């Protein structure tokens, strides 16, 4: 029998009132979002006539997500249910298109299952004790390569009841030694499996995992190899070719660190891989191409000047790459160094999962401005996207706020941009509270694509501001890398200068300004309420790191050089510099009523920062509430607690902005 997940009574009242009010007005509500369908893992069939994808729906009674594997005819848009296995992921066509492989949990953990596409039951072909993390068909379809964890090496001299272990570059929540991740190969019948990588070699860490890309002749796999499986060593990857017969590794370049995502071109004469510009971790990630015969090696995306998030080879030897660009996702076809052209995406502003055929047909999940992800198909790179699904059409039909671009002047000659969302019934003759919703990352960005939190805030009569500060990935290398050694002051200047520009607008109430964010957005929130305490009416700090030492010593990234963290805080006079760029330095100045949110088992931003922020607010006599969610992860993973975050977030801001919303004061424009 299903047990109904219950909300605290006060939150239930808030949820019911918000949902009913929104429904009566036609605004987007939490109840609408409970019905949202999420689409992932699109995969084109080899003949280009059909595709598969996965849908996920929240089940609030069981507090889980219900998955479906669907097949869709690209011509008729008709769908067919293939599986309702829960936890299903990574659907992958066999080269002949007659079978579909996927990962699914069972009695023996997550294993590879093979499903005949024209009928029949899915059959597991692996029994790996530690389960399967990733797999890839060989070009002839006779074999499958996969990644699984090696059994941890035991200390023969240690008492079996002694569970102590050597700590390395791992997060402080780790309770045992990490396992190496090995590449294996198995025939499609599941009868013969053997390990390809040598014992002690790892192709993954606690944070990252190699891809598996076969050469066209089926003799090699392009992989990423790491010196250890510790999560903090995830920036030390090297591209390598793994010989399928012997297990020998050949390095693609002479670099010792920083490489990832190697893939063969269609003729297996070149290798593409991802590497930060000039080897500097704070710089944009570029796609490099290396000729395996001549050794020529160059970046193909330097002139594009964007932080590459994904790429794929086409049959003609060109690349298709994806990256954030201004206030949307960009897609380009790249034919060589300094040679590229944009791929039109129509009214799609954000691209999720994607798949490409060798001739350039594209299948992808895309968000519009007022509608979350649907499945789209482009018969060619030049063609306009064709919408294949309409699962979330009802959300797009709700009355939502207008979203538009905003640009302003900041320090150091930067011109940041961001997104403004207006209340659905916006009246320029009235004054509205301004609410900041700051993105995390920091190597990320806010775009014009659908944002449920921004729209829920706007429905309450607030103007919502989502700033892209230095360190964001949407404006090129100079802007992104400017966060190096400047984790707070510079980005904070970008945000506060944007706030001041908006406060001069006649429709903004300058005395009703709230700030909020999660992860780095929480860091920036904690920084802003201490650095500029006179500005804010209320704040919500989710998963907020507050000092460099926690980020460097306790989380899963720890010693990795990245965005703002370019060196150890414990060397020379770095500690003093680190604290000057940490929110904790201004904690004695805190005055803003703040809601603090965190996950107890957050390995990315440890809950220690939230405890410090809570203590500082409490000790300074500032209204504060601290809510912790049990579990492991950077954000609650189940639907009930995820919804609870939103309810508490909006409820806290509403408490302090009440009376200053859509029915707020009229402006005097004389």
Image (cartoon, rainbow, N blue to C red):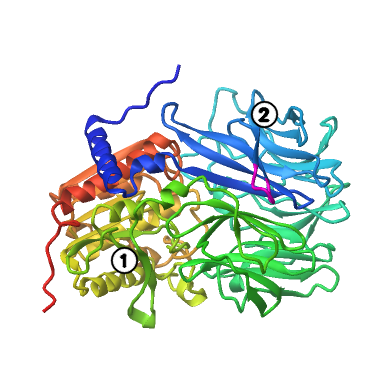
- Provide the residue designation for mark 2: 156
In the rendered structure, which disc, 2 or 1, sits on the residue that comes first in sequence?
2
Disc 1 crowd, CA 10 A, few/some/many (<14, 14-19, 20+): some
Q: Are marks 2 and 1 in contact (CB under 8 Å)?
A: no
Majority secondary structure of the magenta segment? loop
Coordinates of residue 189 in the picture (x, y in percent): 84, 32
Q: Nearer the viewer, residue 538 or 54?
A: 54
User: What quarter of the picture does the N terminus occupy?
Assistant: top left
Residue that appears at 48% across and 73% down:
475
For the question of whether residue 407 can be seen, the reply is yes
Say whether residue 594 is left or right of residue 115: left
Q: Nearer the viewer, residue 270 or 163?
A: 270
User: What quarter of the picture does the C terminus occupy?
Assistant: bottom left
Q: Is residue 15 magenta?
A: no
Q: Nearer the viewer, residue 43 or 276?
A: 43
Is 619 placed above or below 537 here? Answer: above
Coordinates of residue 307 in the picture (x, y in percent): 55, 68
Looking at the image, the residue that sits furthest to the bottom is 413
Looking at the image, the residue that sits furthest to the top is 1
Say whether residue 221 is left or right of residue 87: right
Instruction: Between label 2 and label 1, give the one nearer the viewer.
Output: 1
Is 110 placed above or below 544 here? Answer: above
Identify the image quadrant of residue 11. Answer: top left
User: What segment carries the magenta color?
Assistant: 73-78
Q: Label 2 vs label 1: CA separation? A: 48 Å
Q: Which structural element holds mark 1?
A: helix
For the question of whether residue 546 can be seen, the reply is no
Is 221 placed above or below 253 here? Answer: above
Coordinates of residue 446 in the picture (x, y in percent): 42, 62
Residue that appears at 67% across and 70% down:
333
- Provide the residue designation for mark 1: 580
Residue that appears at 74% across and 42% down:
146
């Amino acid at each position: 029998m299903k047990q109904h997940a219950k909300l605290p009574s006060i939150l239930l009242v808030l949820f019911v009132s918000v949902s009913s009010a929104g429904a009566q007005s036609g605004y987007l509500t939490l109840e609408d979002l409970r019905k949202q369908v999420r689409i992932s893992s699109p995969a084109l069939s080899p003949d280009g006539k059909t595709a598969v994808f996965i849908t996920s729906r929240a089940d609030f009674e069981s507090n889980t997500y219900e998955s479906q594997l669907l097949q869709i005819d690209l011509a008729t848009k008709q769908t067919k249910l293939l599986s309702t296995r829960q936890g299903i992921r990574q659907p992958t066509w066999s080269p002949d298109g007659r079978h579909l492989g996927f990962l699914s949990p069972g009695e023996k953990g997550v294993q590879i299952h093979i499903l005949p596409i024209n009928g029949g039951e899915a059959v597991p072909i692996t029994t790996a004790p530690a389960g399967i993390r990733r797999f890839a068909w060989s070009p002839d379809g006779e074999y499958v390569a996969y990644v699984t964890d090696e059994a941890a090496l035991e200390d023969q001299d240690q008492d079996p009841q002694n569970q102590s272990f050597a700590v390395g570059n791992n997060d402080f929540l780790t309770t045992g030694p990490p396992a190496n991740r090995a590449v294996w190969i198995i025939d499609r019948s599941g009868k013969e499996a053997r390990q390809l990588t040598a014992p002690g070699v790892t192709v993954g860490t606690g944070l990252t995992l190699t891809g598996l890309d076969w050469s066209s002749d089926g003799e090699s796999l392009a992989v990423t190899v790491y010196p250890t499986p510790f999560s903090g060593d995830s920036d030390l990857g090297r591209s390598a070719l793994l010989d399928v017969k012997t297990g020998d590794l050949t390095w693609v370049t002479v670099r010792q660190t920083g490489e990832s995502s190697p893939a063969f071109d269609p003729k297996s004469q070149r290798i593409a891989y991802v590497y930060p510009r000039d080897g500097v971790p704070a710089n944009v990630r570029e796609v490099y191409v290396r000729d395996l015969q001549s050794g020529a090696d160059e970046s193909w995306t330097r002139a594009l000047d964007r932080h590459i998030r994904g790429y794929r080879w086409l049959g003609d030897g060109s690349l298709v790459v994806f990256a954030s660009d201004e206030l949307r996702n960009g897609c380009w076809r790249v034919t060589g160094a300094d040679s590229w052209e944009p791929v039109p995406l129509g009214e799609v502003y954000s691209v999720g999962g994607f798949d490409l055929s060798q001739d350039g047909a594209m299948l992808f999940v895309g968000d519009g401005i007022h509608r979350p992800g649907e499945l789209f198909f482009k018969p060619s790179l030049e063609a306009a996207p064709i919408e294949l699904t309409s699962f979330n059409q009802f959300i797009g039909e709700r009355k939502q706020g207008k979203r538009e671009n905003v640009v302003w002047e900041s320090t150091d000659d930067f011109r940041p941009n961001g997104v403004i969302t207006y209340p659905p019934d916006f009246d320029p003759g009235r004054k509205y509270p301004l609410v900041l919703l700051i993105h995390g990352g920091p190597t990320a960005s806010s775009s014009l694509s659908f944002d449920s939190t921004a729209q829920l805030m706007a429905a309450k009569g607030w103007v919502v501001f989502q700033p892209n500060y230095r360190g964001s990935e949407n404006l090129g290398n100079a802007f992104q890398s400017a966060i190096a050694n400047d984790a707070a002051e510079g980005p904070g200047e970008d945000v506060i200068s944007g706030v001041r520009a908006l406060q001069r607008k006649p429709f903004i109430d300058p005395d009703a300004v709230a700030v909020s964010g999660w992860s780095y957005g929480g860091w920036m929130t904690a920084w802003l309420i201490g650095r500029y305490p006179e500005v804010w009416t209320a704040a919500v700090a989710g998963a907020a790191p507050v000092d460099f030492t926690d980020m460097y010593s306790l989380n899963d990234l720890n010693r990795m050089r990245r965005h703002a963290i370019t060196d150890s805080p414990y060397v020379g006079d770095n500690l003093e510099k680190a604290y000057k760029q940490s929110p904790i330095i201004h904690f004695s100045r805190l005055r803003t009523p703040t809601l603090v949110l965190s996950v107890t088992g957050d390995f990315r931003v440890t809950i220690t920062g939230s405890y410090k922020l809570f203590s500082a607010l409490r000790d300074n006599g500032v209204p504060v509430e601290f809510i912790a969610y049990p579990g492991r992860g950077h954000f609650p993973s189940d639907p009930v607690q995820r919804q609870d975050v939103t309810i508490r977030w909006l409820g806290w801001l509403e408490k302090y902005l009440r009376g200053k919303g859509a029915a707020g004061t009229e402006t005097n424009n004389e």
